[in-house]
Image (cartoon, rainbow, N blue to C red):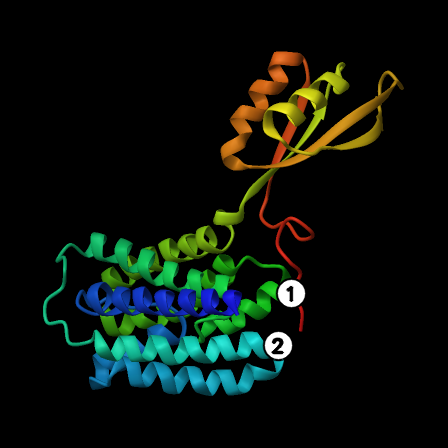
Amino acid sequence: MKKTLKDLWLILFGSLIYAVGVNYFTIPNRLSEGGILGITIVAHYLFNWSPGVVNFILNALLLVVGYKFFEKRAFTYTLISIAASSIFMSLTETIEKPLTHDTLLASIFAGLLVGAGVGFVFRSGGTSGGTTILASLANQFLGWSMGKAVLIMDIVVVTGSVFIIGLEKSMYTLLAVYVGAKAIDFIVEGLDERVAVMIISNSPEKVLENITSKMSRGLTVLDGRGGYTGQNKEVLYIVVNKQEIVQLKNIIQEVDQNAYVTAHNVHEMLGKGYKAYKTT
């Protein structure tokens, strides 16, 4: 129940800032967006239709088409997200003046708010509808990041908006879409991003002891062999938060300044002590 309430809070909060980004920055500055949202905004420019209503209708239709690809919880969360974002868009669409007349600022903040809103919904296990449904499938079956999938699909829609909002506004819209994609990846993956470090040292026992005592972290010891010397070596493997990487390097240098250290980003950790596996 606690997890469900947290997920619902993320959906509502994400849907709110998503709507604020659209109605306070995108539409007042006659920008567009990608995907179904972009079609919704263009329909508003052409026919003065309510973005909230059009957003709900189009996303509901797409959700009906793609429902069989989602587990029950993801489908429910996505439905809640579509309803919440549409309601918030309807409640916030009465603004008469933009918060800024600077199109560059508007595109940046529109991208940040819309992208962050979508990211929070993704973290809950749902999607915000539209192309994010397709992006979720691309992430599941093709291994694309959410931001990359949304960016590719959105560019296609933004290109078509040139005939409605003009080339210059479309270029600013592309900036907003790019910023939004980066915001999505930061919210979905960046908050959990860790660094995997492999350490090859002539004093592996001492390095292991210092890391264990000073960082209260467990390490995995792997058996290795030098390709040139043929000597057997112990390779230490540890995963830490990005904020801990500097401390880890300092600890290693205190023991062995000639240690060979490699590090690479890890976007997700599954298993006991980390994130639980998703269940259907």
Q: Which is nearer the eye, 231 or 219?
A: 219
Q: Is residue 263 above or below residue 267?
A: above
From the image, tell me which residue sits under label 1: 278
Q: Residue drawn at (41%, 72%), measured in percent from left and top?
A: 35
In which image quadrant can residue 213 be found?
A: top right
Along the horizontal axis of the image, is 29 left or right of 270? left
Residue lying farthest to the front in this orientation: 1
- Assign a secondary structure to mark 2: loop
* Residue 50 position in % (x across, y down): 24, 84
First-in-chain label (2 vs 1) = 2
Q: Position of residue 108 (x, y in %)?
A: 28, 53
Does residue 155 show up? no
User: Where is residue 197 drawn, in percent x and y?
Assistant: 65, 32
The numbered dot on residue 71 is 2
Q: Is residue 162 visible?
A: yes
**Image quadrant containing the C terminus:** bottom right
Q: Residue at x 48, y 83 (%)?
A: 62
Q: Residues within 10 Å of mark 1 (few under 14, many from 20)?
A: few
- Depicted 17 relative to depicted 59: above or below: above
